[in-house]
Amino acid sequence: MSDSAKVPSSLDGINVIMQGSPSPLSPEGEHQSKNAKKDPIVEWNLNKAAVSRFAKDSNWPEALKTLKMLSTKHRNKEVYKALAMRVWICLKSDATVDEVVLSLFHLLNTLGAKHEVAGPIAALAHLMAKNRTPDHADRDLAMGQSQQMFNMICENHKIIGEEAFHKWVAANKLEDPNHYIPIVMNCLDIMVGDDWWFDREQLQNEMEAANAKKLAANS
């Protein structure tokens, strides 16, 4: 990807540059409680509810932290939803560059380098690596990770050499954020379906208000 790519104003929805005592348990109840904690389905549902609760309280860092953990529980059939929501919050919130690019890296690994959305995912990771919290200590690591994503795709598509890479980028419009960002966001929508565990509009409105406040303070 060329470093000359600009971030269009029509993509403002994605942040680019952002710096009482319990009652005692009976022995039987205590035994049931311990078993419940070990039950992966019960544990999953408790964490799923926690995401909703954190989001409702506007505690997006904790919601993201919980989703990050759930997105590694590959034995649960809803792991793809957790991963998609993790990526969505990273993109829409003020999550740092390392968190954003890592979430996109996991998305690419999950879908596979041959997936039709792989190119747009790598392009978005590259865009975020360049522009999200550019002074972050792990910014160079994020840039390297986004490059690794492109390398994975090139290897799977047998794209060899700089010229062939640039032709592939041009053919897939990966220099145009207006083209590839909607593709990634639509992919997240498909992965989650109608079962979002938080109010997306709430986060969108909160971040728009925060950004407006920062602009007013700097003007």
Image: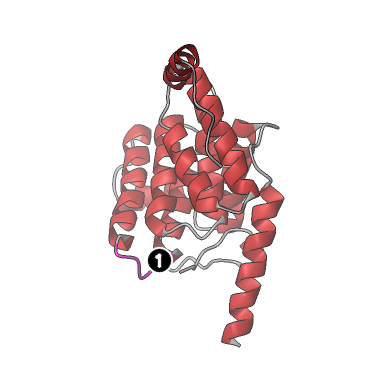
| Rendered-image quadrant of the N terminus | bottom left
Coordinates of residue 102 in the picture (x, y in percent): 38, 46
What main secondary structure does the magenta stretch of the protein show? loop
Outermost residue toward the bottom in this view: 219
Residue name at image x 44 percent, y 22 percent: 37
Coordinates of residue 130 in the picture (x, y in percent): 40, 63
Residue name at image x 64 percent, y 54 percent: 203
* For residue 210, side relative to residue 132 (left or right): right
Based on the picture, tell me whether residue 134 belongs to the magenta stretch: yes
Q: Which of 34 and 182 is in front in this view?
A: 34
Up-down relation of residue 217 to residue 101 (above or below): below
Based on the picture, tell me whether residue 71 belongs to the magenta stretch: no
Neighbour tally class for label 1: few under 14, some 14-19, many 20 plus, Cα within 10 Å:
few
Q: What is the quadrant of residue 69 in the picture?
A: top left
Up-down relation of residue 180 to residue 5 (above or below): above
Count of labels shown?
1
Residue name at image x 58 percent, y 77 percent: 214
The residue pinned by badge 1 equals 3
Residue 118 visible within the image: no
Q: Nearer the viewer, residue 48 or 37?
A: 37
Residue name at image x 42 percent, y 59 percent: 96
Tag 1's secondary structure? loop
Q: Nearer the viewer, residue 89 or 149?
A: 89
* For residue 41, side relative to residue 152 (left or right): right
Q: Which colour scheme is used?
A: secondary structure
Coordinates of residue 13 in the picture (x, y in percent): 63, 59
Q: What stretch is highlighted in magenta?
A: 133-137
